[in-house]
Amino acid sequence: MGWAVLAPIAAVLLALALSALLLQLNGFRAADVVNVMVLGAVSDKRSIAEVLLKATPLILIGVGLCVAFRCSIWNIGAEGQLYAGASAATACGVNFVALPASIHIVLILVAGSIAGAAWAMLAGLLRVYFRASEVVTTIMLNYVAIFITSYLVTGPLKDPAASYPQSARLARELWLPRFLPPTRLHVGILIAIAAAVAVYVFLFRSSAGYAVRVVGLNPNAAAYAGINVARNVLFAIAISGGLAGLAGAIEIAGVNYRLYQDISPGYGFEGIAVALLANNNPLAALASGVLFAVLRSGSELMQLSDQVPQVLVFVIQGLCILSVAAFAVLRRSGARSAP
Amino acid sequence: MQTAVMLNFVATTVGADWRLATPLIFAATGEAICERAGVLNIGIEGMMLIGAFFGFAATYATGDLALGFGSGMASGLLAAVVFAVFAVTIKANQIVVGVAINLLGLGLTSFLFRTYFVSTGRGVDIARSLDIPFLSDIPYLGAALFRQNFLVYATVPIVIAAWVFLFRTSYGLTIRAVGEYPQAVDVAGRSVALYRYCAVLIGGVLAGLGGAFLTLAHANQFVENITSGRGFIALAIVVFARWSPIRVFFVSLLFGLFYALQLQLQADPSVRIPYQALQALPYLTTIVALMLARNRSDAPSMLGIPYWKA
């Protein structure tokens, strides 16, 4: 195995070791990181299905961010784009009830993708026309999207029958089909895999994808070579937003069936770690998406079994990103000293 | 009588504004110094959270406020050391490192809070207000403006000190040179990395102080994600203030005003705007501010770019 595979594995192991240390120092059992978190999450068919369920949005978001990051667009707003997609999907799902179910499902997914892409595009336009850093604007748009969702489920989309702020439930024929009964696993994971392959082909086997990567490596050289930088920037951020929006729509149509105020447990931020661990390679993002889903499932198990606060996943994600950066340096210095 | 009510409203709003702007002023002043050295630190959100938590934890354990603020600053400093090791020494992408610091800050503080504090629910005695003699007796304005806790007043000398440091000392000159043209500093025989470290650490201390203000002078306890984006808003403040600490002060007051306004409007039952629209106000303001701040001529040329020694 080459360094490209070994480095991220070593990075994850280092992050897990540090997390185990953190647990031990605070009176929990360090061994839980292996016994409960990693092994527990993949112990039987049901738990593996739950992992893949969580991997679905992570892969979609991570794959989209591969495109943005390859273009050097630092879209930190996938969380907000997911909320935009989930809101639009729900709005379509509880309306247009006269449509045939199959067309209606497609409409839900397309609406979610378009909403996510449009929400990301706002930041793209601000960057292109106002030179406003997309790092800040996408973060700000996260908050705005979450507040809009909160408004929707307490106002226009609120289920009148419910006391809790939530939308009405999608009709059963609109639910994404499950294919591994009795588990909850639905076709969303297949959509995510297809998206990863498609984006890989686009990025590395098409001239349009090449243009995106050149803009990311050196916008001046790209402009000199006749590549429209602004258009590629907008395109890249729209793709990443669209996939995050699609993830939101799939969460609605495949898992929750209705909109809540806190529809995402931070998938949008976790997707950043997924893309970075995969070195912005969409196919590798399949693996890193599943890995982070294992850690998320496992942290839920640790909370249940040993009352370890589940927020530990954020620590692990942060440590993973840092150790990936550290191993990237070793690789760099290794390349230099080679003859 | 009508004017008296108006004056009272204005004075209260301005007083609340200054108080709400204080954490932003600290964080944004630190970020301005850091960015002047060419380092874009989006991890200040996480550093503020870390300062907020460890400041609270120290005061909770000892009952000593000074120790709390000290611990808030020290923990911000430690987080900044981690940031600098990756962003300056290892030369990793600064945005990526910032994202990691934010995740770590959120995860670590929430983890420790749930492990040690969540069931207690007890707060701490927050910093008491200091009445400034004579000034606090000015009708209307005095009580609102000059009966604040000492950190609110401290924003003024800190901002002035930061400005003097950046623009009137040779250290400040070198820091700015490191952000504009690091080769020159290198050729002059000074360490680019050392100055970048200094700038990042100053930023971390001030972010930690801004965070500790939230738990020790604003609310009386820690809540998960208590900063709720203030660090990110500080990033926008720095751009809008064109990297000058003095302008940071006034721009922060502008943002504080939107926080103050949002709180006042939410408390007013006659206002019919959905509360979510009011909550979104500071974040929308940030976006608008970035749209207006199109003049980037003051931006450090090397902002966000690691320095490779030739």
Image (cartoon, rainbow, N blue to C red):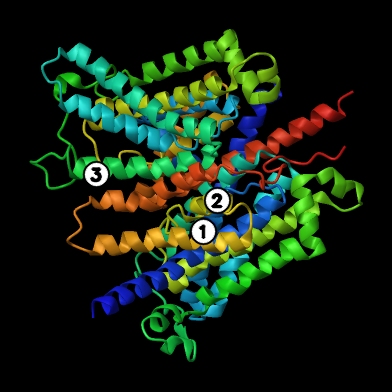
Which of A313 and B294 lies nearest the eye of the viewer? B294
The lab-note entry on whether marks 1 and 2 share a chain reads yes
Say which residue label 3 marks.
Answer: A151
Q: Is residue B218 above or below residue B171?
A: below
Apparent side of residue A20 relative to residue A158 in the rendered image (left or right): right
Q: Which residue is mark 2?
A: B240
**Residues under numbered marks 3 and 1 in contact, where contact means CB atoms less than 8 Å apart:** no
Quadrant of image for the C terminus of chain A: top right
Q: Quadrant of residue B247?
A: bottom right
Q: Nearer the viewer, residue A86 or A313?
A: A86
| Residue lying at 85% horizontally and 52% vertically, measured from the top left | B191
Estimate the x, y position of residue B121 in percent, counting from the top left.
34, 69
The three-letter code of the residue at mark 2 reads Phe
Are dots 1 and 2 in contact, CB under 8 Å?
Answer: yes
Q: Secondary structure at mark 1?
A: helix
- CA neighbours of label 1 inside 10 A, class few (<14), some (14 to 19), many (20+): many
